[in-house]
């Protein structure tokens, strides 16, 4: 795809481009904990968004998206959000301008193979690839963490999704063969080897467009904030669900509406699961890790209530299949992908099994992506 975008950029704009790429991500464990100042365990994957870019003298952002065969041209003054994918590019420029950086005219082409709506954070990959490109082209000198925060702000202000920092962080900081335990409060992180050569990370796409994800994501965030406010009435030092213990949760069960008790309980337990999962990886214990994934899905389905019938069906089938160490819903919820840890020798049979079972149950065949943990955002040097 790198050579394709170089050639298409030259054909479209009649000039050569620099090319950058940023990956989608998987999150092994730790869903909805990032906006609760908790822990997450993501890794960058070998599905990427590509950005080809060159300066122009028009004082405009000219952009063409190969995936959609759409092109737009925007002035770089008085930038406002727009509908669709271009809002992420505009948001990154706007937020850089707000920090005092001057972005002159640019011609851009984007492409990629991060599946849309599959929970691999294609929007974060767009923000990360474009932000990384702007940082290099204009010599802005921003750190990867600063770019991740700009991407998060873009998601908030230009896309209207109050996401945490995990997606942009993972896309920008990924390393081959390693996942990252990120503390979403302190922004401290640790690389942890994901070294299981006999297993692959397999994503099974429910093919359910998670149209509820954006609105319900914001609802869940508000519910967590309501829970924090209640706990803070008893413990003034509490500022997030990260600070609440299991004992405090049980002690104040009667003070919480049932829905808030379930939501808060999931987040508190999920943070503990991340820490246990990291310990299992450090021991090379994929079976304990897989059991933690399955427990996490039960919480996502029954306590946080962001699953759906299709996701529950796939997890149920996967956890009973010989050669699958663990499975759970991944991402914001209400569709998207199921992440599975599948033994290499079981891959063909597993793929065929889930496709047939899903087609029989829901009359559609799921897409299956076999992925591996790879590098984060980078410039792609032109071949000699």
Image (cartoon, rainbow, N blue to C red):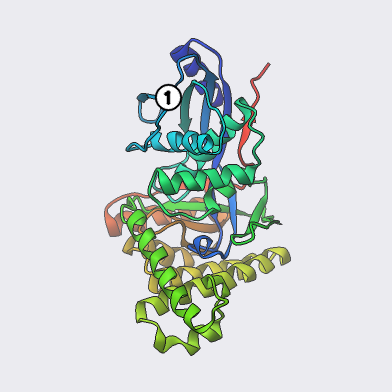
Tell me: 135 left or right of 115: right
Camera-side residue: 111 or 158? 158
Residue 123 on image: x %, y %: 45, 43
What is the x, y in percent for residue 28? 56, 59
User: Dividing the picture into quarters, in which one does residue 138 lie?
Assistant: top right
Q: Is residue 89 above or below residue 107?
A: below
Q: Residue furthest top?
A: 14
Q: Which residue is mark 1?
A: 63
Q: Position of residue 374 (x, y in %)?
A: 63, 44
Q: Quadrant of residue 63?
A: top left
From this viewpoint, is residue 374 visible?
no
Q: Is residue 24 above or below residue 105?
A: below
Q: Quadrant of the C terminus?
A: top right
Q: Can residue 116 be seen here? A: yes
Left or right: 151 as drawn, with respect to 209: right
Q: Residue at x 64, y 20 (%)?
A: 382
């Amino acid at each position: 795809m790198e050579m394709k975008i170089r050639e298409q950029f030259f054909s479209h704009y009649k000039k050569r481009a620099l090319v950058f790429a940023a990956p989608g991500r998987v999150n092994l464990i730790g869903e909805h904990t990032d906006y609760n100042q908790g822990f997450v365990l993501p890794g960058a994957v070998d599905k990427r968004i590509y950005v080809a870019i060159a300066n122009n003298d028009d004082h405009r952002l000219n952009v063409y998206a190969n995936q959609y065969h759409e092109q737009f041209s925007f002035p770089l003054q008085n930038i406002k959000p727009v509908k669709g994918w271009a809002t992420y590019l505009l948001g990154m420029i706007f937020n850089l301008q707000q920090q005092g950086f001057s972005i002159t005219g640019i011609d851009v082409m984007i492409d990629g193979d991060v599946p849309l709506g599959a929970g691999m954070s294609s929007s974060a990959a767009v923000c990360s690839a474009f932000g990384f490109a702007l940082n290099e082209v204009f010599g802005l000198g921003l750190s990867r963490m600063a770019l991740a925060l700009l991407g998060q702000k873009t998601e908030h202000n230009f896309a209207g999704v109050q996401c945490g920092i995990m997606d942009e962080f993972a896309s920008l900081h990924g390393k081959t063969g390693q996942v990252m335990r990120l503390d979403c409060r302190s922004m401290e992180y640790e690389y942890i080897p994901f070294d299981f050569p006999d297993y692959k990370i397999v994503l099974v796409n429910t093919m359910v467009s998670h149209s509820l994800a954006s609105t319900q994501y914001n609802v869940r965030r508000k519910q967590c904030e309501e829970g924090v406010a209640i706990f803070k009435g008893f413990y003034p030092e509490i500022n997030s669900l990260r600070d609440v213990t299991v004992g405090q949760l049980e002690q104040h069960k009667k003070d919480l509406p049932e829905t808030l008790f379930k939501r808060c309980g999931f987040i508190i337990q999920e943070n503990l699961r991340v820490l246990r999962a990291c310990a299992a990886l450090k021991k090379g214990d994929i079976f304990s890790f897989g059991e933690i994934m399955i427990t996490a899905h039960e919480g996502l389905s029954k306590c946080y209530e962001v699953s759906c019938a299709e996701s529950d069906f796939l997890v149920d089938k996967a956890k009973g299949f010989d050669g699958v160490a663990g499975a759970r819903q991944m991402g914001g919820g209400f569709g998207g992908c199921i992440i599975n840890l599948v033994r290499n020798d079981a891959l063909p049979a597993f793929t065929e099994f889930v496709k047939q079972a899903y087609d029989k149950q829901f009359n559609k065949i799921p897409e299956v992506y076999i992925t591996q943990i790879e590098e984060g955002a980078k410039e792609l040097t032109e071949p000699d």
